[in-house]
Amino acid sequence: MLVALCFKGRTYTRGVNLVETLGVEIGVRQAGTPAAARAAGAVADAFRDAGLEPRFHEFGLLGYEADEPELEIDGERWDAGPCIYSNPTDGTVEGRVRRLGKHSIGGFFPEADVFAVEDETGSELARLLMTPFGGPAIPFLTGARQIAVGPAVFISGADSIRLRELEGVSARVRVGGRFVPGLTERNIVAELRGQSEEAIVVSAHYDSVWRGPGVVDNATGVEGVRRIAENLAGHGHMRSLIFIAFAAEEIGCIGSRSWIFDSEVTGELGRIKACVNLDCIAHGERLELMASPQALADRLAGFAGELELGERYDLNVGPAGPGVDAFPFHEKGIPAATVSHFGYHEYHLPTERVELVDEQRLADSVELATLLVESLLEQPVQPD
């Protein structure tokens, strides 16, 4: 049964809801797993239902299977989240904790404490990294972005504050994980041809983290892209639209970087005049609008003002930042924007569930992104 929903004059026909399909029916869909392959098929089917002709852009992948990390501080068990692509420890290692300093990968990521666990000679055995955003201990990547890193775990923001006062305390750490070579992942790409070869990318990632069902992050964003595609597919446009559901975002935006690399090789990247990305759009404290150059940020903020979103949400407008699939476009000098509601306690945790999804936030995000996309189809902004 198809259900028609109307938001601010736009009608979306709901025959499928990718929040439910990806976040509930499929659930955890780490890059390189059979569940991720099922998710790719489901997104492709949804794109077809929206009137598009999807194709797969495939790329090779080094996967990673994490074990549950173990951490004891002065004999007390502390929560720990796996650091993806971390090398394992040799069994359980024991040493003393020393604070190395703090680090931020940029954007809206705050500075986070970094601790070392050292043996009696001062050699580093493992690292304890404060989780991004200061919330619970979650699975994440370390900031350096190289494939393999030394043994490391993430600790919560509260535990990081505790640990600052415990310099030299004893720690026991066990890190387990396996690198899985020879995997294949796939971005789902569907183009809606316009009068010009110039194109606007509309994107979201469909993979999730270790043990996380990814309901909010980012089944909501993929559902948002589906709604935009459904709404715009029946109209002629001055420029072309390329809808992409990216794979492997949670392990370093590998899907978007692979697509950009191949598109640069073939020359297709020269067609792209902007990227509008949706990530975590239905639950969170703030409405984060991250866009560069400034002209694009100003345009996005202007549409948010027209929709009076600042009266409903804590609105934050800033430049394009790392950690989302729009950022690799920005690195290539392409105007790029991300719409996101953030942060929230359940981020990257198994406790993400469909009951957290706020349809009003989702609808507002889709409406805002659609206005920006339509304006870019008519008049792209110039890169700096």
Image (spheres, helix red, strand yellow):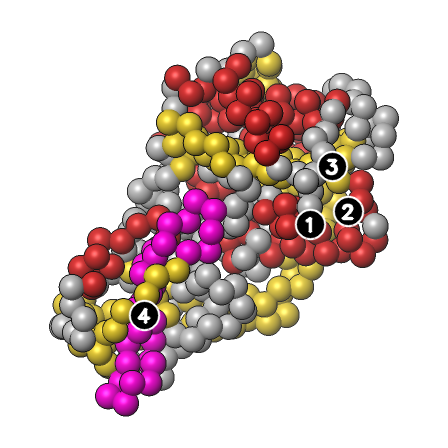
Which of the labelled discs sits on residue 273, or is there none?
3
Q: Which element carries disc 3, helix, strand or loop? A: strand
**Circle 4 is placed at which residue position?**
100
Q: Is residue 112 magenta?
A: yes
Q: Which mark is residue 332?
A: 1
Residue pushed farthest front?
384
Asked if the residues shown at circle 2 and circle 1 are in contact, with their CB atoms under 8 angstroms apart, the answer is: yes
Query: Which label's residue is closer to the chain start, 4 or 2?
Result: 4
Q: Quadrant of the N terminus?
A: top right
Q: Dot 1 lies on which element? A: loop
Q: Residue at x 56, y 15 (%)?
A: 4
Q: CA distance from mark 2 to mark 1?
A: 9 Å
Q: Which residues are magenta?
A: 104-131
Cα gap from disc 1 to disc 4, whole angstroms = 33 Å
Q: Which residue is mark 2?
A: 269
In the image, what residue occupies the spot 42% across and 56% down? 104
Q: Earlier in the sequence, mark 1 or mark 3?
A: 3
Q: Secondary structure at mark 2?
A: helix
Compared to residue 195, the image places residue 336 above or below, namely below
Amino acid type indicated by mark 3:
Lys
Instruction: Give the amino acid at mark 2.
Output: Leu
Contact between marks 1 and 4 (CB within 8 A): the answer is no
Q: Residue furthest left?
A: 75
Q: Which is closer to the viewer, label 2 or label 1?
A: 1
Is 222 positioned to the left or the right of 335 in the image? Answer: left
- Residue 351 horizontal/vertical position (percent): 33, 45
User: Mark 3 or mark 4, which is nearer the start of the sequence?
Assistant: 4
Q: Residues within 10 Å of mark 2 (few under 14, many from 20)?
A: some
| Distance between mark 3 and mark 2 Cα atoms | 9 Å
